[in-house]
Image (cartoon, rainbow, N blue to C red):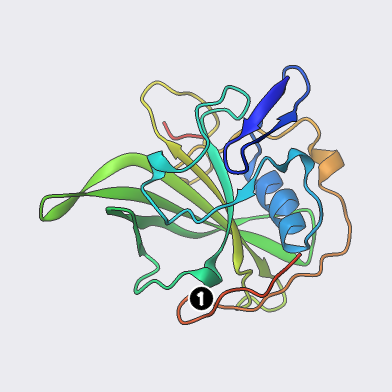
Amino acid sequence: MEVLNPIEGKTYKLPVGYRFDPSDEILAGYYLRKRIMAQPLPNDLIQDCDVYQTVPWELPGGGNKYLNWQRFFFHDLRTCVFDNLNKREAGNGQWRTIEEAQDVELSNDQVVAKRNVLAFWEAKGNGFAKSNWLMHEFRLVSKSLPSMVSSVAVYRIFEKKEGRKGKKAKGSEGETSSSSSSEEEVMDEAPIVIDFTMESCIGTGPPSPATSENS
């Protein structure tokens, strides 16, 4: 079967019965790690995209039965400038932090992933109204130097709907998906070399060229 990549406008083949529904550990420990290390990723299922360019429902992707109901992106925070990381402007609204820096343990002993959960507030008149859209942001952090955080993050963005069932992350505002059956295979033990070049995205320039829902 072929699936359209909405960002690049090309199609790629997926095996029969495939659904892209990575757990937090797979998303951060495999996909984000490989993106930071400029290693090839299977099928380009997660593309680089500025998740703050518009409101979440206008971002590419989503709604495809093979990609589940979620949207996944990489984004380099060095391309952004926010006055307040807990209230990030996007389109006609704001992503507001509701859970901050939750640890996601990874199989590699050099890094840990930090998960932020944000909710989208849409501008309404003179104020803002909370929507059902949620964002999970994952960044890698050095265990030996906790102040050093990867500039590139991976995002899971989705709309929370009533009646959806699935595993909930402990203490998380958003649902995390069940682990892939091939988790042991993809969570390899290759050495990690990560460019930890920033502690926040405020006042930093663009990067150098390089290369599951809540109840």
At x 47%, y 34%, the residue is 213
Q: Amino acid at mark 1?
A: Ser
Quarter in which the N terminus is drawn: top right
Quarter in which the C terminus is drawn: top left
Res 19 visible: no
For the residue pair 33 and 171, the one nearer the viewer reads as 33
For label 1, the SS is loop
Whether 165 is drawn above or below 190: the answer is above
Residue indicated by mark 1: 200
Where residue 81 appears, as percent x and y from the top left, is 42, 73
Where residue 78 appears, as percent x and y from the top left, is 54, 72
Where residue 96 appears, as percent x and y from the top left, is 34, 57
- Quarter residue 18 falls in: top right
Q: Residue furthest front?
A: 9
Q: Residue furthest left?
A: 126
At x 10%, y 55%, the residue is 126
- Quarter residue 193 falls in: bottom right
| Circle 1 Cα neighbour tier, 10 Å, few/some/many (<14 / 14–19 / ≥20) | some
Where residue 145 appears, as percent x and y from the top left, is 68, 79
For the residue pair 87 and 110, the one nearer the viewer reads as 87
Whether 148 is drawn above or below 88: the answer is below
At x 39%, y 39%, the residue is 57
